[in-house]
Image: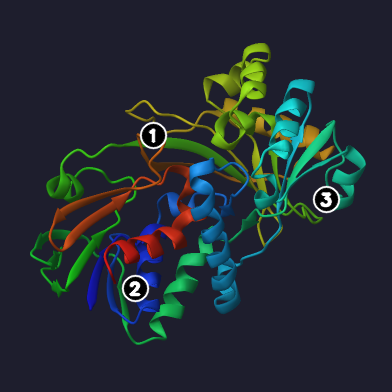
Amino acid sequence: MRLVIIGGGILGTAHALAAIGRGHEVIHLEREVEARGATVRNFGLVWVSGRSANELEITLRSRQLWEEIGGKVPGVGFRPAGSITLVRTQNELAVAEAAVAHASAAERGFELLDPERVRAVNPALRGKFIAGLHCSSDAAVESRQALPALRRYMEASDRYTFFGGTEARSITGSTVVDDRGRRHEGDLVLVCPGAAHSGLTRELVGDIPVRRVRLQMMQTAPLGEALTTAVADGDSFRYYPAFAGAELDRLNREEAQPFTAAQHKMQLLCVQRLHGGLTIGDTHEYEEPFAFDVDEGPYEHLTAVAEELLGRKLPTVVRRWAGVYSQSIDPGVIVTRAQASDNVWVVTGPGGRGMTLGPALGEETADLLNL
């Protein structure tokens, strides 16, 4: 079978990888020369720790697939580094203790560490905290280099062709016409538009139940030492469904976030890139129209929290950026799949889980469509 896949982000690439793995041929179109959306503006985290109970099975499957991919495609930069969520208050500690006591704790690799053990696992953490929730299942890939590496791997099969800088303009049957008038014929068309909900996506399936979310992040110069795990702060408990419960309710009721953090719906996440710098974020903005510029307040907050947990000054910030991703409106829906016609599907809306779940979502779509 020949597939035409529109969209060169993580979802489009993961669906291509699943199809190639099953012996099919793929024509892959991306409107930019290189994907520039949420896929390359994220942390590269494969985040098991915060996923809800109904997401855990597919998340663990995706974690397994990423490890397999990392073994075959070293350029994706897979590393099973784990994470530590650092807690600074008794209410945050109660949330962490509840997570460790939960039935899914062993599957997630949860362990509660005292400060001495935190520093044994991650010696770069020399700041102020009372405990750390360690998740050994969390991992990371290099978001800016993963997609080119995966494309090179697929091209070696001689069944994969990538057209960068190519915008799909129309679909008739299962034939895609691009902005140069070229026709790409296939048996099945998968449209993975990311946060581009208008244009061709709307023409195909109308207004589907997804929304766009904007975030701000930053990148530092090399840290000068190894940050051996990803790091989160206790505010991240507020934004991940795995931690829902009476303890989180008490945290939200009794401990308000600082003004800037609450205003921008913030958490601290931090991961070290292979070049030694830190990717740090993030914020959440849901109401459109989004601003075209970035606010400095969130960066000041993130810097202060990161320095408190590290116990040192951050290296110079060398990049700041905003990104927009697509999120299914129903929190119980992991990804939105909408059928436009017999042979055309739109797949989008994994929220902030695209990099984490990409390989498993590609595999799941392949199963659903009997590829």
Left of 307 or right of it: where is 14?
left
- In the foreground, 185 or 48: 48
> Tag 2: residue type?
Ala
User: From what the image shows, is residue 158 above or below residue 120?
Assistant: below
**Which numbered circle lies on residue 122?**
3
> Tag 3: residue type?
Asn
User: From what the image shows, is residue 237 above or below residue 321?
Assistant: above
Q: Is any part of residue 321 visible from this angle?
A: no
Tell me the residue at 89%/50% (across/down). 120
> Tag 1: residue type?
Phe
- Residue, disc 1: 292
- Residue, disc 2: 19
Q: CA distance from mark 1 to mark 3?
A: 37 Å
Left of 161 or right of it: where is 293?
right
Tell me the residue at 34%/50% (across/down). 194
Q: CA distance from mark 2 to mark 3?
A: 39 Å
Which mark is in front, 2 or 3?
Answer: 2
Tell me the residue at 45%/54% (across/down). 39
Whole-percent x and y of residue 189? 20, 65
The first of marks 1 and 3 along the sequence is 3
Q: Quadrant of the N terminus?
A: bottom left
- In the foreground, 60 or 235: 60
Q: Quadrant of the C terminus?
A: bottom left
> Element at badge 1?
loop
